[in-house]
Image (tube, rainbow, N blue to C red):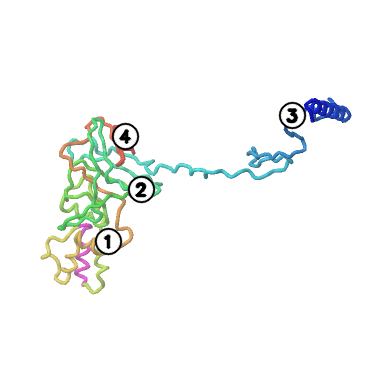
Amino acid sequence: MSAGQDLLLFILFMVVLGIAWFVTGGPSHASSHTGWFLTSSNVSVPIIPGPSQSGTSATSGGTKAPAPQAIYAQSNAPTADPEAGITIDEANAGSADPREEYVIVQMPQDLPHPLTISGWYFENSDGIKATLGNAADIPLLGEANSPTPITAPAGSAIIAVTGRSPNGTSFRINECTGYFAKYQNFIPELPIECPSASTELSRAGSSLSDACSDFADSVSACSPVTDMGAVPRECQNFAAGLSYNGCVSAHQREPGFYEKEWRVYLNRDQELWKNRHDTIRLFDERGKLVAQTSY
């Protein structure tokens, strides 16, 4: 077929196509306003739901679908500071004698759990520091003590004395420590709350004589027997147990043996707090300010 015939056929095809277009609607047909790509409104397009204010998401049909779950769980609310509520009483901070100079750290009654305070430190207004060390849980007389970290429960008191301990160690008060006052001078004074000699006699049994009962009635609380010659012979073994170590041996496993009080000595030979005005600050082992007071 020649080139002229090809051109004639093409023209004829275009004429036929034009007639068909005109017959089917021509320029008013909807396809005249679309491009090369199909965009029919009857085709469903998926809608990705998003969170709504009610906690659900709407679909294209108006129904509610569950909102997507959060990827991360909500963080816990911050817990209360366990050191909150700790206070300092300046007590005898104005004394010029380090043996008599002391302050009192008071733990709150609602403390959620005991706090280990060994390693905490005081600081005065001049920036001089003094650290709270360990203490003997049960101080011993005539034996080497092994101090351990102080763990203070709710409602406890730590009496921090600037000077050195009269018995050589910091210690926790117990039912028997009143005996110490018979040997050394403690400031503030130790509580005299030892079991009485009559109480100890009743623990020994009823086999002892009336003379022993009379002897026990004559012994004041927390008083060791120093003159065994004045003790009836049948009572001497009993009397020998009226001492600090004997008291500890008899009572240390009983409820209420330990008191909520510590005597902690800062082992300084000079006063820490000024006589008239000073600021007492207490920091924990991380350097966080726990409590302060001024006088």
- Where's residue 215, x and y in %? 19, 65
Instruction: Measure how far apart labels 2 and 3 are at the Cα level.
Output: 85 Å
Residue 169 is a magenta residue: no
Q: Image height check: is 62 above or below 238?
A: above
- Would you identify the image quadrant in which residue 37 lies? top right
Query: For the residue marked with disc 1, what is the amino acid?
Result: Gln
Q: Which residue is mark 3?
A: 35
Report the magenta stretch's main SS: helix
Instruction: Measure how far apart labels 3 and 1 are at the Cα level.
Output: 98 Å
Residue 213 is a magenta residue: yes
Q: Which residue is mark 1?
A: 252
Label 3's element?
loop
Query: For the residue marked with disc 4, what is the amino acid?
Result: Thr
Q: Which residues are magenta?
A: 209-222
* Foreground label between 3 and 1: 3
Give me the residue at 26% from left, 60% from top: 195
Q: Are marks 2 and 3 in contact (CB under 8 Å)?
A: no
Q: Which residue is mark 4?
A: 293
Give the left or right position of residue 12, taking residue 63 as reference: right
Q: Which residue is mark 2?
A: 155
Question: How busy is the neighbourhood of tag 1: few (under 14 within 10 Å), some, or many (20 plus)?
Answer: some
Label 4's element?
strand
Q: Are marks 2 and 4 in contact (CB under 8 Å)?
A: no
In the orientation shown, which residue stands out farthest toward the bottom? 207
Query: For the residue marked with disc 2, what is the amino acid?
Result: Gly
Q: Are marks 2 and 1 in contact (CB under 8 Å)?
A: no
Label 1's element?
loop
